[in-house]
Amino acid sequence: MKNLVLAAVAALSSLLPAQLTATVVPTGSGCGIGAMNLTQDSTYARPIMGSPWIMYVNALYSSTQYVAMVHGSIYWGGLDLTYLGMQGCYSYVDLTTSTTDGLSWSGGVATWSVTVPNDYALVGQQLAIQALVYDPTTYLQGVNTTGWVTTHACYCVIGDQ
């Protein structure tokens, strides 16, 4: 009987998806003035299935007027945004597949928070996230002709642990 139970447990275990650790890997560089960047929450730092995932945009300028988190498919190597008037800026998110979430901010920090759906079909899926910020003083300081700047990006893999 014991061997039958062990065999049944082994058979059922083989039906479960393999475990995959969620990852967030910073990549590229931002553009603009100062140290504006993306950081991970200390508790909810990774995109784990069925859990909250929180990222911060830090070191926002006091004159910031708009902050958004852009997320979607990865654009490997980054797309030079000079053609949009954003000299020195790169998009690491494929703009043809992206979604943009407007963020609120206070004290120089914006928070992006989502709950990763509890769906095994998402495990192993890759995405990129990157912040887009509008601050007119960047134009006045000669960063680029638009006032729009970006942070570095993070390449992410959704996991179940």
Image (cartoon, rainbow, N blue to C red):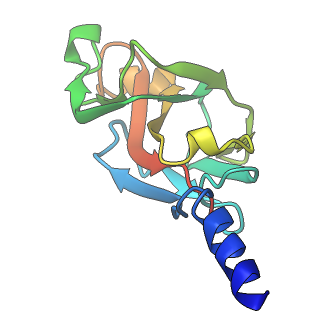
Left or right relative to 75: residue 106: right
Q: Residue at x 54, y 56 (%)?
A: 39
Left or right relative to 116: residue 94: left
Look at the image and tell me in which quarter the N terminus lies: bottom right
On screen, residue 77 above or below 3: above
Q: Position of residue 36 (x, y in %)?
A: 47, 47
Q: Position of residue 50 (x, y in %)?
A: 75, 50
The one nearer the camera, 12 or 110, is 12
On screen, residue 92 above or below 30: above
The one nearer the camera, 88 or 5, is 5
Q: Residue at x 70, y 71 (%)?
A: 8
Residue 76: image quadrant is: top left
Is there any visible trace of residue 109 in the rendered image? yes
Q: Residue at x 26, y 19 (%)?
A: 81
Look at the image and tell me in which quarter the C terminus lies: bottom right
Outermost residue, bottom side: 2
Is there any visible trace of residue 65 in the rendered image? no
Q: Residue at x 71, y 67 (%)?
A: 43
Q: Position of residue 7 (x, y in %)?
A: 65, 76
The one nearer the camera, 118 or 57, is 118
Outermost residue, right side: 1
On screen, residue 54 above or below 5: above
Outermost residue, front side: 1
The one nearer the camera, 157 or 18, is 18
Mark count: 0
